[in-house]
Image (cartoon, rainbow, N blue to C red):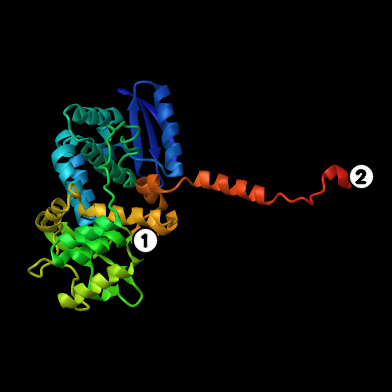
Amino acid sequence: MKSWIEQTQFGWKARVMLAQGRTRSKTFATQREAKAWLRRTVTEITDGSFVAEASGKISLVAWADQWSATTVDLAPGTRNRRISDLRNWILPEFGSRSIGSITQPDVKAWVARMTRDGRNPGSIKLSYQTLAIILRGAVDAELIKRSPCYRVGLPRYERDEMKLLTIAEIVTLAGAIHPRYRALVLLAGTGGLRIGELGALRGRRVDSRHGIVDVVENLALDNGRPVLGPGKTKASKRKVPLPRQTIEALDEHIDTYRVGPDDFVFTSAEGHLLRAYQFRRRYFHPAAEQTGLAPLRPHDLRHSAVSLWIASGANPKVVQTKAGHSSIKVTYDVYGHLFPDFDDRTTRHLEDLWDASKVDNVVPINDRRAN
């Protein structure tokens, strides 16, 4: 690699020649600026962090097309949300801009403008995350050196408060809903399955002998079209032990509706794949109203199951595994407030050990020396 500076009629040009014969150059008004650029560029080329400035000239809309076409690890719902964010919020703001020209102040101003316009804070966060992921991809592709999505303050928002049901309330809801979905409510309320996991459950995945269900697949909607696939995360694939009463309800359901090993356990009344929005509107919400439990979401049954596990004394790692969380951090972020105060429990335990260790035949150290 060779590097040099030469004076031209337009100023001082710094050049770097790579081993393949390719060159990198830039012209500056002063020799000092040219030398600084040359030193920085040689260092970046040497350590592999150099990104040509021309790379960042691709427009965001063009890069978003490339990113979308080459990103294959997104669930259908996540992909649709990213596309919606792009179409409605990101491209109208940055679509015609080159990705290298988008700055951190630009992103901050965009977030601030959406906040002033009264957009939901949670939706703003999702749109910002979409932009950040796409520009992170541009960094990985060596199109830009650094993403402008850093240290951007987002509006604060409160998560929807989870509603936790008791066992008695879960049983009451199961008794009020259409008989076709009684076992579904009990399974969700004691086993913590997500609605997509319930819709994808097949007869052979119910192990009555050992009292477990094997969660393997997930049912999602891709622009209204049902799509079967793997779970939300790798940890979603799991075996969930169930109370005897839930297993009995599942056995009764399988017998009543003649569910075969390869059949879906829960379907629509017409025998089609279970669509979550139809289930909520036709069956779940009316049953919640009838029992006085409204407002209530199907996902609150999952929250209720986890809260019941915690109340029974399950430790965080067991809860993480049974719930299918990707990490213990997710478990603590969502349910940390439900766990007992382990610090207080540890302190009391040490106090009890201390008290139990007090015996009458302990000889003081000074007395031992005297002997």
Q: Is residue 212 visible?
A: yes
Q: Is 168 rendered above or below residue 26?
A: below
Q: CA distance from mark 1 to mark 2?
A: 60 Å
Q: Which mark is residue 370?
A: 2
For the image, the number of numbered tags is: 2
Q: Nearer the viewer, mark 1 or mark 2?
A: 2
In the picture, the quarter occupied by the N terminus is top left
Q: Secondary structure at mark 2?
A: helix
Amino acid at pointer 2:
Ala
> What's the residue at 74%, 51% (across, down)?
359
Residue 322 is marked as 1
* Residue occupying the point 38% across, 21% down: 30
> Which residue type carries mark 1?
Lys
Rate crowding at label 2 as few (under 14), some (14 to 19) or many (20 or more) other CA atoms within 10 Å.
few
Q: Position of residue 98 (x, y in %)?
A: 22, 36
Q: Position of residue 346 (x, y in %)?
A: 55, 47
In the rendered image of this protein, does residue 61 appear above or below residue 273? above
Question: Does residue 72 show up?
Answer: no
Q: Residue at x 14, y 67 (%)?
A: 180
Give yes or no for contact between labels 1 and 2 (Cβ–Cβ under 8 Å).
no
Among the two numbered marks 1 and 2 on one chain, the one whose residue lies closer to the N terminus: 1
- In the foreground, 188 or 54: 188
Closer-to-camera residue (170/198): 170
Write down the quadrant of residue 308 in the picture: bottom left
Residue 267 tag number: none
Quick one: 366 or 168, which is closer to the camera?
A: 168
Say which of 159 and 99 sits in front: 159
Residue farthest top in this picture: 30
